[in-house]
Amino acid sequence: MVETVIQGKTRKRRELCAFYTHSDPIVTYMVSRLQVEHGDRILEPCAGDGVFIERILRDPRSTGSRIHAVELNSQAVERLRDKFKNYANVTVQEADMLVKSTDTLFEEKHELYTKIIGNPPYGAWQDQKRRQLLKKIYGGYVRETYGLFIRKGIELLEESGRLVFIVPDTFLALHLHAGLRRYLVSHTKIEEITLIPSKFFPGVSFGYSNLCIITLVKSKHPGKNMIRIVSLARRVDALYEVANGNYGAADSVDEINQDDVGRWENIGFMIGCQGNKKIRVTVGEAATRLGDMADCVTGFYSGDDRQFLRVRAQAVKRAVRYRAVPEAEVSFDFAGQEKILSGLSDGKKYVPLLKGGGTRPFVTGTDWFMRWDSEAVEFYKRDPKARFQNSQYYFREGIGIPMVKTRRIRAFFLQNRLFDQSVVGVFPKKPENLNYLLAFLNSIACTKMLMALNHTANNSANYVKRIPVIMESAAVAKVEAIMERFWQGTEVREILVEIDEVFGKLFGI
């Protein structure tokens, strides 16, 4: 079977950010989930080049249906009108779906739709005035447009109407989309979420997330509903088989209780647990979380690293753009200085800085240095690009976690150094817990739970603080003994094996 793939993207500044696709497996799967019937009232918002409408019109079950294409781009509207000029049942309208009144789309009647299908824009640029308007209409998070299209689509559906969208999968986990998740689980039955790599969508490749196809039915009373989670990572043409009900072609198939998602909406769908129900329950129902035991905060940013950041030596990874630090200008006695947050008082210019990339477990060296004289600190405090945030935690004893995800968390001892915004700082409320938490954060059990909390590319403080923690006296004693051996020089690999065993048993994962 030959896959038809045509990709075009139109961009006017970033207002539209529309991705058009003729990926035949994706279109076939999505139209199959729409379940077209005679007499349907069908909407394709952000219709682009009308690829879904074309496929629906080829389905004999679409006879007697009325199809409405809405598009914001004037040039695309003209192409759509020309393409469907011989179809009396297809109406093309130029409109801004997100702000247009819901009762004027079918102008002759105030009707809702029975079916909605589409590929709404994502990552669209919006000026402040438009954000304020959308905030007034929808409330909540409005900077990412695709979530608003999901919300609008549900509003435009009649009860028991179906919606099928392809969108980024970030709404499944990110705390910014908690309001959308709450709306979804209370106003719809989510039938199926199919996860696919962004590379399956020609011309699109996100570093921070992948794509998903969500199929839902509008319902005031969702009742007991199990959401099917289908993962396809290897072959885009497997969508043909899944479209016909052959789930054996998928890489994995899982089910999530919609009621659980409702109870855990701030935590999300937890698709990153890879079907491990034990992890899902542990993360969803934890009595104690890291945020109960430690402050989890984001670090510092100078606003102009080219000017203020220095590197130990040019051989350091990603150091090409930065000058080497004069060793005589580095202060190594900064922690004891009374007014360190106002700048160095010992005549030196730079302090050690920890960044997130290339760190090692438990202890990591210092390759980077930040200018920290009083003049520089004043710049950080007033410059709009700088982030002099959570400064009460600078130069304190704590634990650092790299913001960028890796296969295994590599948490490290901060050792009173400054840390930048590529690091989440974890500061135990009880200092005696530092060794235990440092070990736990380096365990594979912790990595798995953080992945369940947020499957996307970043480990922000909002997710780190939600990691479940168990403080059991026997486990604490074992970990303290293991860490004591580490500080005495035991090999890191041996220590990691031992802490994995302790925390694996403790959490049962």
Image (cartoon, rainbow, N blue to C red):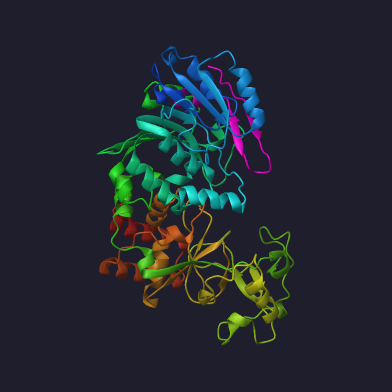
- Residue 46: percent from left, percent from top: 55, 33
- Residue 227: percent from left, percent from top: 33, 37
Question: From which residue to which does the magenta span run?
Answer: 1-30
Q: Residue shown at 37%/73% (left/top)?
A: 433
- 401 or 163: nearer the viewer: 163
Q: Residue shown at 65%/77% (left/top)?
A: 377
Q: Is residue 91 magenta?
A: no
Is residue 134 visible in the rendered image? The answer is yes
Judged left or right of residue 423, residue 371 is right
- 247 or 257: nearer the viewer: 257
20 in relation to 270, above or below: above
Where residue 93 sits, quadrant-wise, is top right
Is residue 270 visible in the rendered image? The answer is no
- Residue 301: percent from left, percent from top: 61, 66
Total labels drawn: 0
356 in relation to 143, above or below: below
- Residue 415: percent from left, percent from top: 52, 74
Q: Residue shown at 70%/86% (left/top)?
A: 347
- 201 or 146: nearer the viewer: 146
Q: Is residue 28 magenta?
A: yes
- 111 or 240: nearer the viewer: 111
174 in relation to 111, above or below: below
